[in-house]
Amino acid sequence: MILCSVVIPTRNRPEVTTRAVKSIIDQKNSEICQIIVVDDNSDFDYEIPNLREQDSFIKLSEKSTAAHARNVGICSSQGNIVYLLDSDDYFIERDFLKDHDDVYGSGNLFYCDFESGRKKSQLPGEVRSSDYFNFIFNKYEGIANTSTLIFSKHLNVRFDPVLPKHQDWDFVYFNFIDKGMSLIKLRGEVYIDRGDKRSISRTRDSSRSNVWTGRDSTLINI
């Protein structure tokens, strides 16, 4: 029985995507978890060797955005709860059955701690709407990173596909924080690989940020 789904958007990254998939399969109770790899029209064909019968590989016919690829994966998910994982990141510690029991049916968004390089996060147990901007801009670097997020599928939440950057901040803010919901820390840990300097999220082009901050007058300029 499939109770959980993990959505991995990817493009031209078969090696790290294979690593991400393996990290999911290696976790506790992974037999109840479906893996959905959504390839954003890579320039070449490839296969992910570890995918199982319950898993899916979806190749988009046209290049779009990681946000659109995530939306396709969320729509295709069969699990009651959905995890997000970028293709260059991987799970360190997860228990899919325990997570399902804690997350399923909740209206809140869940996140977990992460490692990056030699640093391990020490994130708070809860993020309330009044703390959100202070936490993401000033206090907790990397909090609510896409690869740490878990939520119930019945919430029917989506990413804004036009955003080139800050897709995770936008997703969290408009789907949860703006509606008065909380972010709750869940057990488990993810490794966030910051080695790819070409990643849009790691570029310093402020014009890409302005697309997000210009969406709503209540957002803080960054």
Image (cartoon, rainbow, N blue to C red):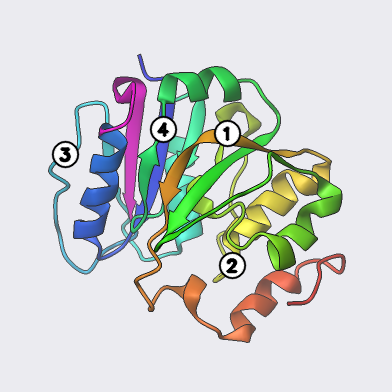
Report the front residue among 28 and 172: 28
**Relative horizontal placement of residue 140, taking residue 98 as reference (left or right):** right
Marked residue nearer the N-terminal end (3 or 1): 3
Task: Categorize mark 2 by other alpha carbons within 10 Å: few (<14), some (14-19), many (20+).
Answer: many
Relative depth, front residue between 163 and 103: 103
Mark 2 or mark 3, which has the lower sequence index? 3
Task: Residue type at mark 1: give it.
Answer: Leu
Query: Considering the image in quadrants, where does the N terminus appear?
Result: top left
Cβ atoms under marks 4 and 3 closer than 8 Å: no
Viewer-side label of 2, 1: 1
Give, as a single range, the part of the protein colored magenta.
26-39
Q: Residues within 10 Å of mark 1 (few under 14, many from 20)?
A: many
Report, in whole angstroms, how far the alpha carbon at label 4 lies from the one at label 3: 18 Å
Q: Residue tagged by mark 3?
A: 50
- Cα distance between the residues tagged 2 and 3: 31 Å
Q: Between label 3 and label 1, give the one nearer the viewer.
A: 1
Q: Counting residues from the N terminus, which is met first, the one under dot 1 or under dot 4?
A: 4
The residue where tag 1 is placed is 186
| Residue 168 image offset from top left, x and y in percent | 59, 57
Count every numbered label the image shows and give the total. 4
How crowded pointer 4 is (Cα within 10 Å; few <14, some 14-19, many 20+) is rated as: many
- Give the residue at x 25% y 62%: 13
Q: CA distance from mark 3 to mark 1?
A: 27 Å
Which label belongs to residue 94? 4
Q: Which amino acid is tagged 2?
A: Leu
Q: Is residue 113 left or right of residue 2?
A: right
Question: Residue 21's spot in the image, x, y percent?
Answer: 27, 43
Q: Quadrant of the C terminus?
A: bottom right
